[in-house]
Image (cartoon, helix red, strand yellow):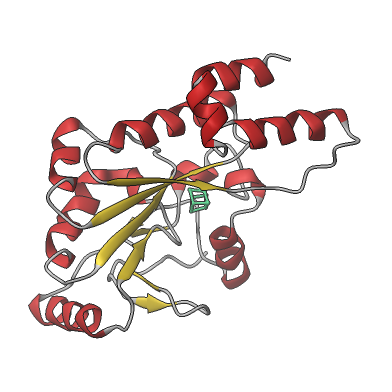
Amino acid sequence: MREYSNKISLTKNGRGIYYIDTSIGCESGIFNNTGGCFNDCYAAKIANRYGYDFGKTVERHFINESHKRQILSQIDNIKMPFIRIGVSGDPSENWNHTISILKIISRCNKEIVIITRHWTILTDEQLKYFSTINICVNTSVSALDKPELMQKCLDQYRRIKPYCKSVLRIISCDFNLLNETGHRLAKIQFYSGMNPFWTQYLGHRKIINLFWME
Ligand code: SF4
């Protein structure tokens, strides 16, 4: 199988969004599921198509000063107000490494949008650093998640809020309401975190308990 390069790069996707992954491949996401999250990870599918070992996370670095300057200049010049981290890997696999890259790219005048499943949890110290930069953490969550993972993600989404922008990124599905499981998952999707009224009224923990325990 082919291995990913450890050279960090700035990439533009088909929708014109720029991203710079601090790691590529996703050992944590593949651990319980060979196809990644929900057995349907887009990045894992692309990796399989081109013969890359997506189950082996490769941390990416600037290879020298000139490479660093080149990427910083590219970020400065893109015509978007933000760049993403967390497209073909998850920055939470090693927050220390991610923060070492953030300390460099945050010099550019762009918001940094992180997409994560919180495989490892940010420390208080790391969160304090987040409060000093222009960053928005998108926590991905889905009704298809096991209750422990959903609870962990929702807890982190709330915990991060006092430090920086924190957003829930709902991976939604069109569940079959005529099927018993589909009906239960549709209720989780509707009530848990995706609907501010119910979240405020019942709280995340109660909602998850209510529907997962049915
Ligand atoms: S965390 Fe992201 S990159 Fe990793 S398997 Fe899940 S969807 Fe794919």
User: Looking at the picture, how far across and down is residue 109, in whole percent?
Assistant: 17, 71
At 33% across and 77% down in the image, what residue appears? 80
**Total numbered labels placed on residues in the image:** 0
Determine whether 66 is above or below 133 in the image. Answer: below
At 12% across and 58% down in the image, what residue appears? 103
User: Looking at the picture, how far across and down is residue 194, in whole percent?
Assistant: 56, 39
Q: Nearer the viewer, residue 129 or 37?
A: 129
Quadrant of the image for the C terminus?
Answer: top right
One can see residue 59 in this view? no
User: Looking at the picture, how far across and down is residue 64, in whole percent?
Assistant: 12, 75
Q: Quadrant of residue 112?
A: bottom left
Q: Nearer the viewer, residue 189 or 30?
A: 189
The reply, left or right, for residue 104 in relation to residue 77 is left
At 16% across and 55% down in the image, what residue appears? 133
Q: Nearer the viewer, residue 142 or 93?
A: 142
Q: Nearer the viewer, residue 122 or 188?
A: 188
Q: Quadrant of residue 21?
A: bottom left
